Image (tube, rainbow, N blue to C red):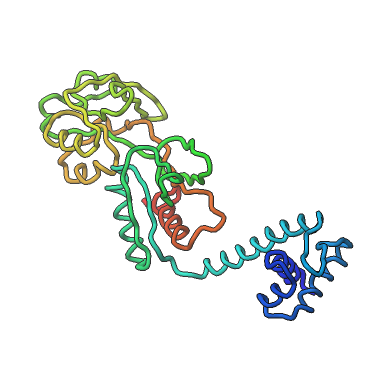
Amino acid sequence: MDKLAGMAMFVRVVECGSFSAAAEASQVSATMAAKHIRTIEQRLDARLLHRTTRRQQLTEVGRLYYERCKQVLAEVDLAEASALELQGNPRGRLRMLAPVSFGTHSLVPVLTDYLARNPEVSLELTLDNRPPDLIDDGYELGIQLGAIDQAGLVARPLRPYRRLLAAAPAYLARHGRPERPEQLSEHACLGLSYWRRHDRWHLLGPGGETCTAVVKGPFSANQGNALRIAALHGAGIALLPEALLADDLAAGRLLPVLPAWSYMPVPMSLIYAQDRRPTAKLRSVIEFLMGHFGSEGVA
């Protein structure tokens, strides 16, 4: 007789409490239910159940076999459900977390493209610069800058996160353009207030050369767009994410400063909880984002 069918019947007999109840639940005869159990006992050469006219009780071998059967049957159900899921269309609501500047200027345009291609999916995006806590906060997907120190996560590497230096033409006309990172100490520098050492900019230059520039300035903020606006009004040289500066640089509203140098690139990862059965929705979003922001993705 089929092993899986026998295992399923044995589990049902145990959980229903009798052959007759298990047979009724399985829509077979009590004789057939008993035959499944006898076949297993003969194959194992061991008794699985102590049976009396009033009740039945698992033997030690039966208890172990019951637990293993439940695991095997669960794996079979999972395999079939996963195969069906692979054939299904992405659908449902997905909650995602991402850093503010990257999320606003780089991620949102890509997500809107994804939604246009997958009309049965809805996305709830939260923008927050704090390291995401996906598991406790109930998010399915996140983008994190820096090292991943939370257990139970899968981390897919994305292209490193770059910050560039830029200033308004009017500021550079008044104060000149620095030629070396060390000269930034002579300029008004606009930085993020929540950096632990916001008076130090660790820069990477040509050929892997590094420099730690000591900076100061009249204005700092905890949000990149505020620094961008200050830079547009000529307040100083800003160090901001590449995506946040792109439109202003292209339009000439801001000019690159020390273009061969950038802030030390920060690793960026797409993270999600370890899941033995990712949904079509989650899998499709991951593949779409890796195609755009992964190291081999589009520019």
In the displayed structure, 176 sits above or below 256; it is above
Residue 36 image point, x, y percent: 79, 72
Q: Across the whole image, how many numbered discs are drawn on residues? A: 0
Residue lying at 31% horizontally and 25% vertically, measured from the top left: 201
129 sits left or right of 179 in the view = right
Residue under the point 28% across and 19% down: 214
Residue 42 position in % (x across, y down): 88, 67
Q: Quadrant of residue 223?
A: top left
At x 35% / y 45%, what residue is drawn? Answer: 98
The quadrant in which the N terminus is found is bottom right
Where 217 sits versus 286, above or below?
above
Q: Nearer the viewer, residue 257 or 153?
A: 153
Eyeballing the image, is 77 above or below 250? Answer: below
Where residue 192 sits in the image (x, y, percent)? 26, 30
Q: Nearer the viewer, residue 136 or 80?
A: 136
Q: Position of residue 78 (x, y in %)?
A: 60, 62
Q: Is residue 222 left or right of residue 64?
A: left
Residue 66 appears in which quarter of the rendering? bottom right
Residue 60 vs residue 224, the one in the foreground: 60
